[in-house]
Amino acid sequence: MFIFCVLLGLIFIVYGIIVSTVGSGTGFFMIWIAGGGVLILVSCFFKRLNLPFRILLCGSAAVVICIISIFCLMILRDFHDEPEKDVDYLIILGAQVRGGGPSRVLKYRLDTACAYMKLHPDTKCIVSGAKGKNEAASEAAVMRQYLMNRGISGSRILPEEKARNTAENIKYSISMIEERQAVICIVTNNFHMFRALGIAGKQGIRADGLAAPSTLFYLPNNMLREALGCMKDLAAGNMSL
């Protein structure tokens, strides 16, 4: 067990370092590095701890793992969401842009939306995202240009450039839609869909989901971040289940 825990801790640290090279704009990779370090440290001193503390430590770890696993299972529920009927508006949630172009995560969202819009010529989209401190342009502007470069008419793309998080993405995008009976669909990556729809539901918005794919190697990082994000948003009253 000692060797297994130490190896697992080293894997966490290496994984965190690899995730850090992606430059996602967040420091979430430190969770893996710190977690791996703590796991190795606890493994080295575990036998020296008294029995009640060992039981408390193992029990706490089991509870945390259980809660995270439950949220991951709920996240998986919306991994392959598609709209049930023709959509009037797609709301494409923003993500990191770099060097004037979308990140891989954002490309997945845009390519999925582009494919849908080519099959449904009456569908419009709202591209949502402000300009971050480490971004050369607003996410909305970059997204709009990317779609236009792939044959989507600019008249079908509405930019929303104020939103700085998922809740604002949805709130500000909805305010741009004048038709009260419009059929709305949120476009985001599979791992983010559950939280996005939960936030929309909390705002009283009925929306379908169109799930974009993601990179398998980074899925553990994205799933863990989303599970913790769901806990935070539920605690803050920002989303509903």
Image: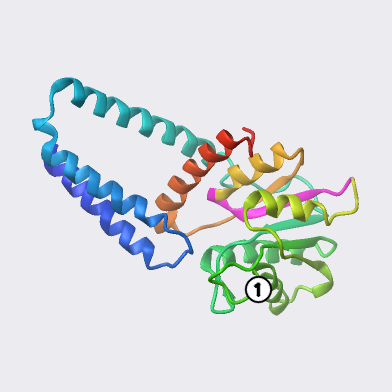
Residue drawn at point x = 76 percent, y = 61 percent: 126
Q: Residue furthest top?
A: 52
Question: Is residue 13 located in the magenta-colored stretch of the structure?
Answer: no
Label 1: how many Cα within 10 Å (few below 14, some 14–19, many 20+): many
Apparent side of residue 6 relative to residue 64 in the rendered image (left or right): left
Placement of 18 over or under 87, stated as above or below: below
Quarter that holds the C terminus: top right
Residue 108 pos. (x, y %)? 58, 63
Q: Quadrant of residue 84?
A: top right
Quadrant placement of the N terminus: top left
Residue visible at 83% across and 57% down in the picture: 176
Q: Amino acid at mark 1?
A: Val
- Give the image quarter of residue 129: bottom right
Residue 94: x percent and y percent?
A: 63, 61
Q: How many numbered circles are shown? A: 1
**Residue 49 point in image, percent of width and height:** 13, 29
Q: Secondary structure at mark 1?
A: helix
Q: 143 or 122: which is nearer to us?
A: 143
* Residue 222 showing in the rendered view: yes
| Viewer-nearest residue: 156 or 238 | 238
Q: How is the image coloured?
A: rainbow
Q: Residue at x 76, y 54 (%)?
A: 172
Q: Is residue 162 above or below residue 2?
A: below
Q: Magenta part of the protein: which range?
A: 181-191
According to the picture, the residue beneath numbered tag 1 turns out to be 142
Let me know if residue 182 is in the magenta part. yes
Residue in view at x 43 percent, y 36 percent: 68
Where does residue 83 sit, x and y in percent of width and height? 72, 48
Looking at the image, residue 205 sits to the left or right of residue 12; the answer is right
Q: Is residue 218 left or right of residue 58?
A: right
In the picture shown, does residue 222 fall above or below 116? above
In the rendered view, does 67 fall on the left or right side of 37? right
